[in-house]
Image (cartoon, grey):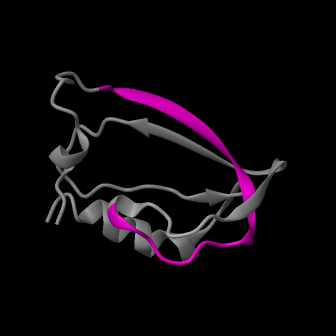
Amino acid sequence: MFTANDFIPSQYSQTLESGHFQWSAPSNIALVKYWGKKDNQIPANPSVSFTLNNCKTITKLTFEKKHSTDNFSFDLLFEGKPKEDFKPKIQKFFESFYN
């Protein structure tokens, strides 16, 4: 099981009080998908795909440092609206840092 320290590079000694991050990832459609892998995760045969630059997912993350030792909380929005269905799996991942 991972701990929070597994995700913090040793070269960083300071933490942020708050911040935000945004990333955009275009859709990629595989026309021919490779099957199997060789050593070091190299595909056993090639694949053919194309990228749809205008069809993309945009992920935004905003955070604030918590100053209490109570359980954490988070909100998850999908297309600007709360999406409670997605929360249990993400919450389980976050809780793995504290158990």
Residue occupying the point 33% across, 26% down = 17
**Of 7 and 45, which appears nearest the observer?**
45
Quadrant including the N terminus? bottom left
Position of 93 compared to 67: left or right?
right
**Of 38 and 23, which appears nearest the observer?**
38
Among the 4 quarters of the image, the one containing residue 95 = bottom left
Looking at the image, residue 65 lies above or below residue 56: above
Q: Where in the figure is residue 5, as x and y percent of width and height?
A: 16, 45
Residue occupying the point 23% across, 65% down = 96
Looking at the image, residue 1 lies above or below residue 59: below
Looking at the image, residue 12 lies above or below residue 51: above
Q: Main secondary structure of the magenta part?
A: strand
**Residue 69 in magenta stretch:** no
Among the 4 quarters of the image, the one containing residue 23 = top right
Residue occupying the point 16% across, 23% down = 13
Q: Where in the figure is residue 3, as x and y percent of width and height?
A: 16, 55
Position of 56 compared to 75: left or right?
right
Position of 40 compared to 75: left or right?
left
Residue range of the region highlighted in magenta in the rendering? 16-39
Q: Where in the figure is residue 58, as x and y percent of width and height?
A: 68, 46
Quadrant including the C terminus? bottom left
